Structure formats: structure tokens, C-alpha cells
Image (spheres, coloured by chain):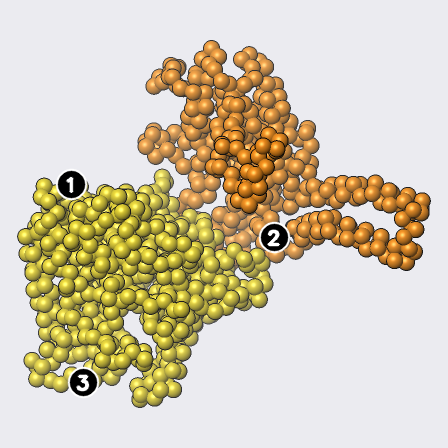
Amino acid sequence: MTLTLDRDDIQGNVLLPYSRTRFPIGRLLLLHQDRSRSSDGACRFLQDLLPEITSAQLFESKRTRRWAPIPTGALREATPVLVNVAFTAGGLAAFSVPEATLNGMPPEFLEGMKKRAVTLHDTVEAWDPIWQEKGEADRIDLAILLRVNFEPCLKQAYEQAGQEQRGTKDHHPPAIFLAARKEALRRLDEQADRWIASAGAGDLRVLPWPGQGSKPSAEADPDPTQWLETESLVRTRRDDGILASSGDDDDLRYGEYEHFGFFDGSADPVFEGQFPPEAQAEAVIGQGRLEGGAWQPLATGEFLLGYGDEAQEMPAAALPFSFSRNGTFLVMRQLQQNVADFEEAISRQLPAFATWLGAEDPTGDSKAVRQLLRAKLVGRWEDGTPLGVASSHGEWLAFQAEYRRRLDAAASGDEAAQKELDRFKRQFTDLRYEADDHEGGRCPLTAHIRRCNPRDSGDPRLLDPSDAAARAAAGSILVNRRRILRRGMTYGPPQDHRSGENAVRQPDQTGNAEPPNRPVNDGQKRGLLFMALCTGIARQFEFMQQQWLNYGADFGAGNDVCPISGVMAPQEPPLDSKLMIAAPPNSDRPPFVMRPAPSPVDCRGGAYFFLPSLTALRLIAQGLVDPL
Amino acid sequence: MPSFDGGHYQLTALIPLRQERENGASWDWKRGPSSEQTVQRPGSVADSLRELLSSFRSVDVPDLETESAAEGRVARAIPFSGNDRTHFARLVVVEHLAYNGRQNGDTLIDMFRGFAQPWLPAALRLKMTDEVDHLPRPYLLILIDFDSPDGSRESVEKYLLDLWGSMQQEWAAILKHCHGFTQAEERQAASYMDLILHHEIESSFSYAIYPWGAERARRWQPTLGKFRSRRSANRSGLLFGYIGIPLLELLVAMLLIALLGRTILFNPWFIGLSLFALALKPLVWHQFLRRANEPWPALEGTDLRSVLKALFLQNSLLHMLETWQQRSVAGSPSLLSHFRHFLDVTRPHDLQGPTLKAGSVHHRLRRRPNRNSSQP
């Protein structure tokens, strides 16, 4: 019998991510319960909040409408603002969850991220004060996550401007777009103010965030804010290039790109019950568990408490069952991105890389070489195209052209063309490293995406890597218990690449002048509010961060760390990490040794949360959690 | 051969600890703030030895708080790093045998045992409590893997003597906790050898065997000796020994009876041959076990010196490659000339030449490369 999850009992954003284009602006509020008062006020506040919380029920959307057997009327419209709540271990205690229940929680959750800093190579002293929780009164208890629905805002903006909204076009005229954004912020303000006032009445204090603005010096923060605002990065039609729909070049949309300029979120695990059965077969390709050459959905218990996991065990969780079931753990990390440092390291090594490429890329186009080097660090091109699909700039352009052609064919509404397009899009996720690229000639063995999700690499049953048939049969057995659902959002203003125009242009050794758009360190806070969901924080998130991102031994790369999000263990003297870029197959060139920026991503803090089911939220709010 | 495989000797010894203080000898390794002062503290011998063992350095990163601050001071060495044959060493205090709880019997059989309880011999009767095994006293477990040419007693003795030469102080401090170690300083070397060799136990588990690495190396250079797993041969041997031979005997006997009638059973030739076959069987079995116990041959390049040299070459090659990569394009020396220089400097086949010091992986290998390093 296939598993049908009770979507109304699970909080939203758990099963499927909230779209970053439809729900582009979010707010994270962290609250502290005043321990000198009883928890009654806080529970009352939670009771008030309860009816507004967004569940995992499917929304009406372009995507869900295609899952045919769901009657269209059964899909509901998304609310104007989506609301979700999560608790830290201390927060559960503050809401009077019995100790016997809390003791059943996994130790890493009870300890919290701050105490796990050594494991994660985090430097707590460098964290933003809000995450440091220095005093008893600064403890983070509760997180409220808001996301605004952008479509009604757009609709309103079009109406007010007296214009007709043309079809389902992605890009919108700047005036309309900005008016809609203003409306979205207004709606968020309204909601946030409402909940802050209500929380205050329930003895819950909003913890202050450091100001978001430019603050190059380390002076005291004059304008703390009440929330961390996350907002998808805006893209012009020009930015989207060949894949953009027709329209004006300056038209705007919210995109899924992160601050380094890469499409983020191509891959996300697929597990049993997550999709309606008819959508699962397509979704699981490249995203589930690879066994015997076929993709299967992962076990539900890897991502949702109360169900069997990949070891056919119930994930460790607290009693009563009704408290844990349909809940999960949320790992939150504020990852600051140092775009200028990241680009600087690339610029520095670009001439050597161009020389190394030599005859393979004779165009001498420094932008293309730069894009290739950037792609080698991540394992995907900027638009998410995997290196396994297109390993040279020329192949990438051809891939984009083909994609465009299929998009156009499908736009006519032809069912067969749509199927073709779906099949084509599988290439973004259906990757097998052992079968197609076991030496890393296309995608380096220690590129970001190979580290985060090694897929079939390192299958322990693969004894002789020179045996092509055995490699083709490799599965993802080593990876199945280390997956996380990613729900991150960008924060902070985008890096202005034009701000570097006044930077001194230094001709390099090859005589090519650096392009004038080299980004400079502008002191702005920007990055990714990393959010991951899993049932075993230590087994899934922490293992991945520690073993796969902060070390390289599993990939035969010693202490090398991930070129994007790895952090070396503090050592004296400090060591440099490297990325070995193997030459393409059948090439006699030696590999290229890339030295990435020492820390392109800095963790500025984080915490572990429990994201309860709606049943559990009710039990907490009513004080009915009973472990016996 | 037990304890010896693939050119590596797996020394395993269980040495009983002293049970009482003998002139406070076990405790005098603990130094006070001034290094001459010794500290007397109450505590068991096992705990004292544990504390001593954990005070030894096992990784070559400096102790950040205490040592890197002391300017110019070299990090305290790992005791075993003075020896370039030791692949692996672990010293542990063992106090308890694992207790897995009450052993569950078969319910059905236990029921019958219950019925027959009064008539059963004491050993078969059901008991209220299981017996729990204990060690009479704590033991020091020594596990060391080292390069040995032939696994002979002489080679083990020679290794132990070398080891004593490079870490005499440490061994003396450790063995002072053990039963039977001499107090007289001039006889300590002999006492150390006796103690370890006398308490050695057989082992068939190696911690430092590199078949996987050797197999990878062989793929690059097929002339190297091939590592062959005996697993399938052993399995088929066991199957043949336990099932094949008895089955064959049975078949032959049945065939003979069918062909020649039952009288064959009383034929003296038949009886003689059968007795001979019975006598031969243990010999065949013994031969099979002997073959199975034969150590794997030493794989080329898996002795510690070769491993250290390989690690050194790996890092030097990377350094060479990076230097070449950063070259200016016009008129710079070719990769070949860089490589020639690399060969001249590192001398790949010369194990005595430049190499990595045992036990110092971090410091020598992974230093921050100088981006403007000179061209060869």
C-alpha cells in the first residue's frame, strides 16, 4: 500500500519547498519567553497563532495543476502570508513540554548548534550576537517564519496601474514589480507587527537582529531590527538571457539564484509520500535512492518523524508518538557570503587556468573561461546545468539553445512536446558519477555538488573502479542516510558588480586586462539563510557538513574542504585547501590545482529547531503533551 | 602464519597490571609544575596507566594552547615516530570483559530441561543466574603493526630492541605499571623484551595492510605483484573438506557395495584401504590448514618507508605542478623540465633520500605553498 501522508497535519515547506519566486520575501523572527513568568501567556499566543499556520497541503500552482488526478477544485489558493513556527529545545521547555518528553529528543538537538561548534568547525565568537545567546534572557526559544505570497501583490499592482497582467509571464515591468514588492513588504509588516504585539502580550520578547545595512566598522549597532529579512534575488530579463520569455530587457522577476550567481536548489531528495503517486515517478529520477540502476523514493523516516527510515528503523524521537509524528528537525544557519573574496580568488587564478585550458578553449574569451572555472567549483554552470551534461562552454551554449527550443515547443500547449521537455529537464538531476564521470574529468571529484550529494560515488560494493559494468551498477547506498531537504533563502542586497568600476585595472601575465566589473568588498551583509530538514541532525546534516564539506577524505582529497561551503579545522600554521580539476577524459594534460578563497562562506550563527506537526502544536498550546 | 601477513607483523600482547603499589613506582611519571617534582595522588594502577597513555601525543599537531605559544619550540614528538617501521600502535587498558546480558536459550528445549531437571547432571540444569566472566585483574593490551621481513622471532626481537632504543623512557614508565617488570634500571631492556614476548598472543588481524592501495598502484604499473584474495579458495577448501570428502567417500563405498556386493565389507583389502584413507584424512586436512595459514607475500611498496616516500612524492609533485601552473607563458621551462627537476630533487626510488619523517604528516606535507616560489 502506498503511503499517503496527512498533509494537513504537517507544516508547510516541509514536504515541498515554498517557491522562491512565488513567495520571494520572508521574515525570520526569533523570540524568547520570559522565564520569570509562567508559560500560560506563551501557550495562549500559540493558540492564537495556530489557525494561521500554513500546512503542507498542496497549493494551486502551475506545477500542481499538471498532476492530473487531483481535482483542480481540491487545490486551495495560498494565503497572502504563510506562517510557520519552530522551537529550540529550550523553547519546548519554556512552553512547559514535560522533561520526560524532552529527554526522548536526540542529544544534538538538546545541545543546540552552539555546543556542536567544534564538530562543525564553527567559531562561535564570530557569530552575530543574536545567535550567541550570551545570557539567560537572550536564549532563542521560538522561531516564526513568514513568507509573503507575491502573486496577489502583482495582481494588485497591475490593477492599480491600469494595466492588464499578460498571461503567466515571469518578468514584469520595473514599475509594476517595485509597486508589488512595496505591497508585499506592507503585508509582511502588517503580519509581523500583529504577531509581535500578540507575542509581547504572551510574555514573548522579540530578540533584536543587528542592522542589515552597511556597517564597515565594528561600532555599536544603532539600528537593530526585529527580524532577519530574506528575499530572493531580483533578475532582469537580460540576466536570464536565452532562457527568458519575450519582453523588455529591463523587466524584473524574483529568481532562485544565490549571491555567487548560481542557480540554487536544482536537487532535493524525493521520499515516499512527498508527492502524489502520479507525480512521484517523474520526481524521483535523480533525486531518490539509486539501487540496481533504478531510482526509488527514499524512506519517509529520513525526513519526517514517525515513519520508518532507510535503516528500517523509527528515527529517534520523543514520546508521546502524537508529539513527534509528522514533525521534523530544522537546521538553521546564517551563512554570510563573501562574494568579493570568492571572485578575487577566481580572478587571481584565471590566467593560469586559461593557459591550462590552452587549445581546448581557443576563443580567448575571458568571460567564458571564468564561467567554466566557476562551474568547476560548484559542479554546475550558473544556470544549474550540470557539468556532467555540458563540460565545456560550447556544450553549455548548445544545451541552452536546445532547452530554449523545447521550451518554445512546449509553450504551444502540445502534450507530447511537454513530455519531451520534462524528459529534457531530467538532465538537471539525473546524474550518476560512477557511470559517467568517475575520474572527475567533467565534474571535479570535490566540486560542491559532488560533496553534498555523492550519489553513486563510493559505493562500497564497487571493488574495482576500472570495471565499467560494475560502475554502471553502482548505487547510492552510502548516501541514502545523509540527505537533507534544503529550504534556504537569500538575504541582503545583491553584490553590485558595477561598484568595482573604479578599481585599478591590473593587466595580468597573459596581457588580458581584468574585466572592469570585478566586485569589491562593500561591507554589506549578504548570504544565505540555510535551512535544512531531516530527522537525524547528527547523522544527516552534521555528518555531511563535517565529513563531506569540512574534510575531503571520503573523496580521496585528504583535508581539502568544499570550495564553496567548507571550513577547515583551525590549525597552526593555517593550511590551504585546494580543488583538483582533472583534465577531460582522454586528455594528456596534468590536472589543474585551484586554490579557492579561504572562506567564501562564513557561518554567522545558527540553531537547531523542532518543527512540530499541527497536532503537536495544539498539544503544546493546550499543555496536553503527556509522555506516559 | 598467525600474527604475520603481507610483510607486516601484528604484535598483540596482554600484560597483567600490578595490583598494589610497589614503592610508589607506578606514580613517579607524574611531574609537577617544576619538572623535577613528582606528584603523589591516590588512584588505581589502571587509572595511572590510562592517564600516562593519554598524555602521549598521538597526532602531530601542536597543542595549540600550551605549545604554539612557546616560541620556537618544536611540538612534543609522538613516541612511536622515532621508529620508521611502525605502521600502527595502540596501547589500551582492559579491565572488563563485555557482558552481553543473560543468554537466551531455546524455549522449547528449556521446557524439556525443566521437566528433566532432577535427573540432569549439574552442568545441564537450568540456572537462576548465568555465570559472568571476569578478568582477574586489569591488563595492558598492546597492538603494534610493523614491517618485518619474515615474521621470525628474531625479527620481532630486533624490532622490539629498536623500539626500546627510540622510546626507552616511555616504555619504562608504561611497564612500571605491569606485573613482573624489573625495578633495576640496568635490566629494564631485557625485562621489557621478556614481558612483551612472554605475554604475546596470536592474532590474525592486521591494522596496517594496504591491499586496496596496492591494487590501485598495480593498475598503474602492472608489473607489480598482484594482490590475490584467498577468500574464494578458502571457502571452496572448507566446503570440499567438510562436505566434499565425506560425500565422495560415501559415494565410493556405495558404488563398491553395489558393484561387488556386501561381502566387500569384509574384504581385508577394502578394510585396509579404508583405514589408510582414514589415517590420510587428518594429514590432508593439516596440509590444507597449513596452506591456508601461509602468510601473504609482502606487497611491494607497503613498508612504512615506501609509504612515507609515496606521501612525500605526492605532495612534492603537487607543489611542482602548482609552480609550473603559475609560470609565465612566454619562454618558461616546459613541464618536462619541471618534472626533471622534481626527479632530481626528490629521487623517487631512493628511500634513504628526501622523505617524510614518520609521524609528522601535517607539518611537513601540508604547509602553505609559496605562490611566488622560484622556478626550477
List x then y, in percent, for residue A24. 20, 68
Q: Mark 3 Cα within 10 Å, few/some/many (few <14, many 20+)?
A: few
Q: CA distance from mark 2 to mark 1?
A: 58 Å
Q: Identify the amino acid type marked 3.
A: Arg
Q: Identify the amino acid type marked 1.
A: Glu
Q: Identify the amino acid type marked 2.
A: Glu
**Residue A621 visible in the picture:** yes
- Residue B65 versus residue B188 in the image, above or below: below
Which one is nearer the viewer's eye here, B304 or A347? B304
Query: What is the drawing colour of chain A?
Result: yellow
The disc, 3 or 1, on the residue closer to the chain's N-terminal end is: 1
- Labelled disc at residue B215: 2
- Left or right of A72 in this view: B203: right
Rendered-image quadrant of the N terminus of chain A: bottom left
Which chain hosts label 3? A
Query: Which numbered mark, 3 or 2, is in the foreground of this view?
Result: 3
- Residue B114 versus residue A596 in the image, above or below: above
Q: Secondary structure at mark 2?
A: helix
Q: Secondary structure at mark 3?
A: loop
Quadrant of the rendered image containing residue B182: top right
How many marks are shown on the rendered structure? 3
Query: What is the drawing colour of chain B?
Result: orange
Q: Secondary structure at mark 1?
A: helix
Q: Mark 1 Cα within 10 Å, few/some/many (few <14, many 20+)?
A: few
User: Which residue in the structure is indicated by mark 1?
Assistant: A136
**Residue at (27, 63) in percent of width and height:** A14
**Residue B354 visible in the picture:** no
Quadrant of the rendered image containing residue B75: top left
